[in-house]
Amino acid sequence: MYMRFLKSVAPLCLLGGLVSTAALAETSIWQTDEFNIPEANQGVGVDEDHFYAVDNRTIAKYRKSGDYVTAWEGDSDGPIIHLDSAAVIDGKIYCSHSNYRYLPMTSSIEVWDAETMEHIESHSLGIQLGSLTWLDRHGGYWWGTFANYNKEAKLPDGSPAGIPYAIRAGGNINTTLVKFDEDWGVLESWIFPMELLEKFERMSNSGGSWGPDGNLYITGHDLPEIYRIRFPDAGSILEVAETVPLNIRGQGVAWDHSQPGTLYGILRATDEEEEQGMTNRVVVFGSDVPQKEEQKCRPRYKKDGDDNECRRREKD
């Protein structure tokens, strides 16, 4: 068992001649387990008894002991092209999906029954703000990121497009965090600060999951870090509240809400590791992230069973 304590760091950021200092970092995250999971190439989801490793066209179900259960696999010429993350909610696995790295950029939400691993729903988003890389539910709303990239796109025939995989000029600066309603309509959106975009390099925001403390945590594509995000009091640019070193290589992450404070991530095997016979891994972490007390809706605000009046915009 690993007990490798990782303290978060809060660097000084020089922006427009002003020095911004984050609050003294206090979050500790430590590794508790690691499993060899070949399918853990894009992300991971988790529920009470299982975790679900995500590859482009595959979702593999494992017991939390690391024992394989079963998997859903899409055909190489089927409609599922690039799955990117998993959020397991009320017995369903919600996955972000896109046609990465082909133009035009399209996205959808694909849903599986976590018990049977049957594909049961599909919500097409068509051409939106980029390539949907993760989604999660929090505060009565859906949240996710439409990623944009500096990496070159491909034309439908697979040939190089000669332009970045992005909705417009600028590449990954167009990456957008979105708050959705129940019907996947966009309610609000934010862009990412340059300090994160520079860390993403050619890539973008790959993973995201709402923590037990009511804060959003996101990851990049490659770096061994997770970022606690703060929503701005005004304007549309997200802020980095904390940067926490983590034994992952970017990609999808998932907080385990059946065990508050437990976080799942993945380690993609490098080419060198694969030559040595190693494979992708799912990594499990403990943390001192506190559990936020759930706020109950006041009955006088509830109208005909609709909890819209109970919802609050997440600022923390």
Image: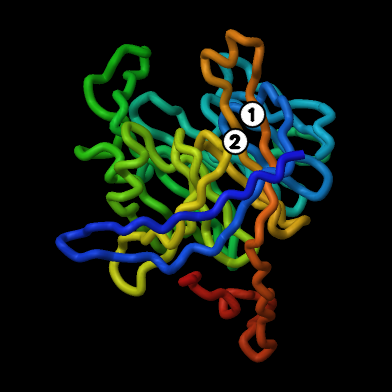
The reply to whether residue 153 is in sight is yes
Circle count: 2
Residue on which the image places disc 1:
40
Q: Give residue 35's position: percent from left, percent from top.
A: 73, 30
- Height in image: 292 above or below 101? below
Residue type at mark 1: give it.
Ala
Q: Quadrant of residue 198?
A: top left
Helix, strand or loop at disc 1?
A: loop
Quadrant holding the N terminus: top right
Determine which of the numbered discs, if any, sits on residue 95 in the image: none
Q: CA distance from mark 1 to mark 2?
A: 6 Å
Residue type at mark 2: give it.
Gly
Residue on which the image places disc 2:
43
At 62% from the left edge and 49% from the top edge, which residue is drawn?
A: 5
Q: Give residue 9's position: percent from left, percent from top.
A: 45, 55
Q: Nearer the viewer, residue 68 or 309?
A: 68
Please rate how many residues cluster around mark 2, counting C-alpha atoms within 10 Å: few if below 14, some from 14 to 19, many from 20. many
